[in-house]
Amino acid sequence: EMQLVESGGGLVKPGGSLRLSCAASGFILSDHSMNWVRQGPGKGLEWVSSISSTSQFIYYADSVKGRFAISRDNAERSLYLQMNSLRPEDTAVYFCARAMGDTAPNDGFDIWGRGTMVTVSS
Amino acid sequence: SYEVTQPPSVSVSPGQTARITCSGDALSAKYAYWYQQKSGQAPVLVIHEDRKRPSGIPERFSGSTSGTMATLIISEAQVDDEADYYCYSVDVRGNPGVFGGGTKLTVL
């Protein structure tokens, strides 16, 4: 079964840092771009970041550029999101999502994890 | 920054056809993708590349485009289709990605 499982969420103070992880199983991670998408409480989906299969191409939403860093380790079948200088508006469920091919963000996201909750509050 | 726009809500009776629109300046050049999200669940891709249906998605779900507007069409809508639906695309440069604000579909 193809699966993505996020971890690393929690409560953090404004200005703090957090590192999210996403473990992939049931498919070859290195064949796909990978992505982070978030959803604030009661809000819609927001694309956060994409990384190509070899990490050659990396893209960020303006709202997180300069604060967040996406990375991946294909050998470890893992995707990461390092989040620094966190703000209350970063509070959201963070989903890891697989792109169908290797053209993200211009691609469909066909496998999603269940998400991990990040709360930024003092 | 680039935006794609959806109506906040659409309501149909069971058995009717629901149409959810998504407008964006780059949609004449870039693909639209559609996601279904039921309460408390992760999104599910229902249409990719404007009109293609992933395996496992019922034939009742289809997509179309015309100019700068993409449309998700749900034929013979069922109560189980009640969900939030999100359009996704990219700007003309291929980055960044952007979701529409979501459309709440009510079937009753």
Image (cartoon, rainbow, N blue to C red):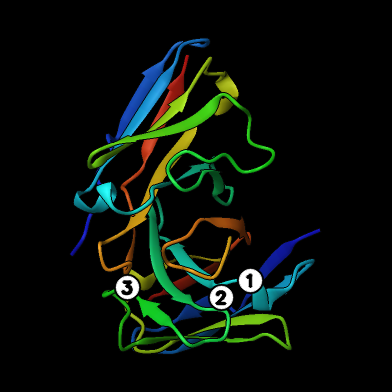
- Which image quarter: residue A16? bottom left
Q: Report the side of B83 relative to A100 (left or right).
A: left
Residue at left 44%, top 34%? B63
| In front: label 3 or label 1 | 3
- Which image quarter: residue A85? bottom left
* Marks 1 and 2 in Cβ contact (< 8 Å): yes
Residue B6 vertical position relative to residue A20 in the rendered view, above or below:
above
Q: Which residue is mark 1?
A: A6
- Residue type (three-letter) at the residue carrying disc 3: Ala
Residue nearest the viewer, comparing B94 with B7: B94
- Which image quarter: residue B1? bottom left
Instruction: Work out whether mark 2 precedes mark 3 in sequence or the reverse, and give the earlier one.
Output: 2
Residue at left 48%, top 88%? A56
User: Residue A105: x and y, percent?
Assistant: 42, 67
Q: Which residue is mark 2?
A: A9
| In front: label 2 or label 3 | 3
SS class of the residue under badge 3? loop
For residue A61, the mark is 3
- Residue type (three-letter) at the residue carrying disc 1: Glu
Discs 1 and 2 lie in a common subunit: yes
For residue A37, the mark is none
Residue nearest the viewer, comparing B12 with A89: B12
- Residue type (three-letter) at the residue carrying disc 2: Gly
* Marks 3 and 1 in Cβ contact (< 8 Å): no
Residue nearest the viewer, comparing B62 with A11: B62
